[in-house]
Image (spheres, coloured by chain):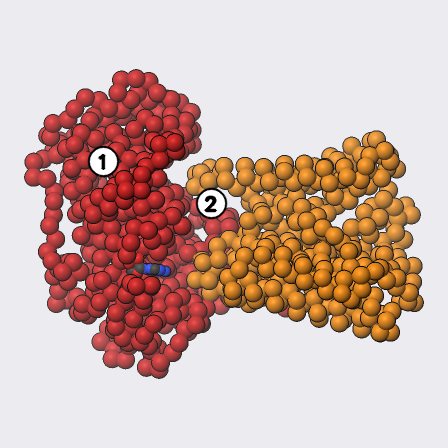
Amino acid sequence: MNRALRPLLATTAIFLLAYIAAVLQYPSMLSTRVLGNFLTDNAFLGIAAVGMTFVILSGGIDLSVGAVIGFSTVLIATLIMWAGLHPLLAFAITLVISAAFGAVMGAAIHYLKVPSFIVTLAGMFLARGGASVLSPDSIGIKHDLYTNISRSYILLPGGGRLTVIAMIMLAVFVLGIILAHRTRFGSYVYALGGNETSAALMGVPVARTTILVYTLSSTLAGIAGIVFSLYTSAGYSLSALGVELDAIAAVVIGGTLLTGGYGFVAGTFIGVMLQGLVQTYIVFDGTLSSWWTKIVIGGLLFLFILLQRLVFSASSPRKKAFRKS
Amino acid sequence: MQSKAELWQAGNGGQDMADGETPVLEARGITKIFGQHRALDGVDFAVRPGEVHALLGENGAGKSTLIKILTGAYQPDGGEIVLEGAPIRFTDPLNAQGAGIGTVYQEVNLLPNRSVAENLFLGRQPTRFGLVQRKAIVTEATALMAAYGLDIDVRAELGSFSVAVQQIVAIARAVELSGKVLVLDEPTASLDRNEVEKLFEVVAKLKARGLGIIFITHFLDQVFALADRVTILRNGQLIGTRDLRELTATEVVRMMLGKDLAYGHSTLPVAEAAKGPVKVTFTGLGRAGRVAPFTLSLHEGEVVGVAGLLGSGRTEMARLMFGVDTADEGEIMVSGKPLKIRNPAQAVMAGFGFCPEDRKLDGIFGELSVRENIIIALQAKLGWFRALHRDEQDEIAGRYADDLDIRAASHDMPVKLLSGGNQQKVILARWLANDPTFLILDEPTRGIDVGAHAEIVRTINRLREEGLALLVISSELDEVVAYSNRVVVMRDRQMVAELHGADITPAVIVAAIADNTGSAEARI
Ligand SMILES: Nc1ncnc2c1ncn2[C@@H]1O[C@H](COP(=O)(O)OP(=O)(O)OP(=O)(O)O)[C@@H](O)[C@H]1O
Ligand SMILES: [Mg+2]
């Protein structure tokens, strides 16, 4: 079996076990209502985490994601409420700006040979700073489109609601899976994460791929920002604080190797759902502080990094070659 | 996509074009400077269509650097590249690939984290509506590998296969990409005889089709078997380009080294040389699925050669001895005392040294300097609280660098910037500096130039005379014969023969290796 699959299977098993345990304690957790909320509440995180998966697969990291989400919400709110633009135009402008932002970061990482965490850390400060300059206060968004979108959903059997933003997230995941596993671009991303020197010697367009990866991540952060503004009907410069770290946690828990080259976009989905499950459990429990989410996620993260070390370094490649025979 | 896999089956259709006039790829006055060091100095080089052109030189002569410039991986500091008569600038390897130049770089440069199929097709996967046709790739890759005699699951991670398989994948990829020129930088270093023959067949057929083939190796017999012309570099300078029909091996070596080769094989028959008391004994050491239990003792002042095909269990045996893999049965006695060795650190404490076969993966700390790489095992043995003084470090590194003729601009240079052969010498120096009493060498002369070859054989004989016990794994039977007191033969993960005295001749060893199998299948 492909050893990269093992952490993914482990995550899936843990998710199912945890869900069963939660349902045994609170039977009402087994409903499409709860599932629908899972998806809606974590839509923005899931979308950003897809971008983060590509970045991590390529061997980098993107710390600017949360800030770009925050910036996008503020930008959208100002464009709609102050400049009077139609939300769709505001969305388009936001996407163009966030894409350009990612492209510049990717170019800096590649051409200046600065580590990605430094470049994207700078990006994070820039985006947060930019958002506060636009508006330090929260701006409520009132527009028919917003009302309509929050009213539309698909009714699931059992009374659950599949909202528009949940559908956007699912679509992003599907597209992300196809992009990662079925396109040349996807194979270049894995190649970069595997060994950049080899990739270059094999003719992988390293510069273009690096720039595209960060462009993708920032664009998805922009979409996450749109979704977040739809979710909260507001723009606020301090929204989505630390979401980059939740996204990284989702990616790693989903079985992607933090050093790049191994992993699956689908795993990230389970990573996000696992975080959602923990949050929901804490809501159901009612007595636990919401900080328990962080503690549990921290514990899981630790467990998974440990698991990956076991899978990827303990079994040296050659050993496996002989097991095959 | 037309696969060249058919080359295996199809006959030799073309004619000999070795005398074609316009070179297909040409380097004119190429200069490359790294810091202060001129790796290449005004080198001219030209490969014609339909010829195999060998590029020879000592370790560090600049062969790989020239290849990297010809294929766009490095930019030259002077000179120009000419493709089919027109000057061209390759900005990156993709460019060169696009122009029909397929390359196997010296370090196996593929992606261990991706499948064999993806490694073969990366960058040119067939797509439909932008989606990669995975089934088609798997089918084609399977056929391609079968043509090279490998029956493997091409969907498995490349890293899960042996270095030899990875090497074949790299060759297959380059061959598929080569429309005009195929570049092979030491492609045979980790291949066995059968695979080398297979490679030669492919090369002959590509040559017949009119491709220009550049071939770098340290095996002179392969040069004479395969190449039409030869270009020789020394210290970044062009020594000359000659027709091989006019040259003898001795002349080639003299051009490479600038002097005659001094063979240091000791004159008295090694098998009769005096040896001391038993140093280490392995009794029934084995690990299920890897190496069948074997029993072997080594004396002080004795060299035991290990022969066998790649994948016959030679390396696995060494790894068990050194605790890289833990044995699940058997005992180890060192100087008459039983000892448990469960990891390499314990082996080092017991006075063992192990210079592994796959130095790229197992041995080199690329970012550390030559000096640090040499002293690291010694330092680990002394313990970090008895840090070696800088002067001592310099002295030790300097001594072994001289002994083994390690060519580096400075001992503070990161090892990864050394030429391939010099990196290997650094690892050897590391274990010699560690002053072991029992030393395991796995293919110590792989990728090392003829001059240094003789030097290493001399070193092995010297260490033996100094009273070390040595276990030397090698596919170079001439060398095994030159230094071994005894030879053990491995086949199918078992020790199948032990040869003494007059039996130690290449012919007897080959017979013992081959016996009833003689197949290359052993390794997969
Ligand atoms: N990136 C680099 N930076 C600095 N020096 C380098 C670099 N690459 C190569 N060199 C130096 O250039 C010289 C030529 O190296 P090259 O790899 O071309 O040798 P080679 O002829 O291929 O030797 P070998 O037979 O050992 O592979 C060496 O002295 C090496 O240390
Ligand atoms: Mg070289």
Residue at 27% across, 40% down: B392
Where residue B129 sits: x, y (%)?
63, 68
Residue of label 2: B160
Residue of label 1: B305
The residue lying toward the viewer, choosing from B355 and A140, is A140
Where residue B240 sits: x, y (%)?
18, 69
> In what element is the residue under mark 2?
helix
The amino acid on which the numbered mark 2 sits, given as a three-letter code, is Ser
Where residue B470 sits: x, y (%)?
23, 33
Residue at 44% across, 46% down: B161
> In what element is the residue under mark 1?
strand
Q: Residue furthest left?
A: B267
Residue at 21% across, 68% down: B238
In the picture provided, is A103 more to the left or to the right than B334? right
In the picture provided, is B109 more to the left or to the right than B244? right
Mark linked to residue B430: none
Where residue B356 sits: x, y (%)?
33, 41
**Number of other residues with Cα within 10 Å of mark 1, as a class: few under 14, some 14 to 19, many 20 or more:** many
